[in-house]
Amino acid sequence: ERNTAGRVLIDGEVMSSADEKIFVPPEKRHVGMVFQSYAVWPHMNVFANVAYPLRVKRVEPGEIRRRVATTLAMVELTGLEDRMPNQLSGGQQQRVALARGLVMQPRVLLLDEPLSNLDAKLRGKMRQDIRRIQRETKTTVVYVTHDQLEATTMSDRMVIMNEGQVVQCGTPEEIKTHPKNPFVRDFLNQ
């Protein structure tokens, strides 16, 4: 979808600009995406699910094997390459989706409520794992959540939005100690 106003930049490069009539197709932006629903393909095993973005880009088969193996190790799924999604737990399926988002070595990884379908114990483990992976890969992660604990513990910087508008930006500590308005204060105190 094209933006109707403003510009979208990644690493200073314009991806989309309504005024300048610029639109880089999503598949050329080097952005990984992990959805709330996992979006793991049920007819593909773990290896094929993770390898899919590389195959679409026509990456050489040996490089595909290497990058999938490295990424599966990163998300702690080594040894499950031949399993089908229906043979995996919800947490394992989420890790497959995360690996698929990371395997292309994206400039930005977008995570849309990735932990909302997991139980509380697994959510805590996955929060730690996502933070660890972000630090290891040095990938910029944009993490969308309505969970205050996730927002405050996983981020270096937060953006609080209300009805599509940015209400406040800053570090979790800045926002906690100096909320700009009642909406921000209430969000953090839920």
Image (tube, rainbow, N blue to C red):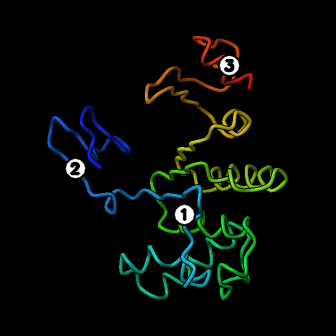
Q: Is residue 77 above or below residue 136?
A: below
Q: Which numbered mark, 1 or 3, is in the foreground of this view?
A: 3
Relative to 123, say whether 156 is above or below. above
Q: Is residue 143 above or below residue 24?
A: above
> Which residue is at 47% across, 67% downward?
104
Q: Earlier in the sequence, mark 1 or mark 3?
A: 1
Q: Amino acid at mark 1?
A: Leu
Three-letter code for the amino acid on which mark 3 is drawn: Asp
Q: Residues within 10 Å of mark 1 (few under 14, many from 20)?
A: many
Question: Which residue is at 74% across, 55% downward?
Answer: 126
> Which picture quadrant has residue 36?
bottom right
Q: In the structure shown, which secondary structural element does the residue marked by tag 2 occupy?
A: strand
User: Seen in the image, is 167 located left or right of residue 30?
Assistant: right
Residue 149 placed where, x, y %? Answer: 74, 36
Query: Is label 1 in a helix, a strand or a loop?
Result: helix
- Residue 77 in percent (x, y) is at 72, 74
Left or right: 27, with 24 as reference point:
right
Of circles 2 and 3, the one toward us is 3
Q: How many marks?
A: 3
Identify the residue position indicated by label 3 in the image: 186
- The quadrant of the rendering that contains the C terminus is top right
Using the image, tell me which numbered label, if any, was put on residue 23.
Answer: 2
Of labels 2 and 1, the one closer to you: 2
Which residue is painted at 62% across and 79% down in the image? Answer: 69
> Which residue position holds label 1?
102
For this rendering, which residue is in front, 186 or 98? 186
Residue 55, x across and y down, in percent: 42, 81
Badge 3: residue crowd in 10 Å (few <14, some 14–19, many ≥20): few
Left or right: residue 145 versus residue 92 is left
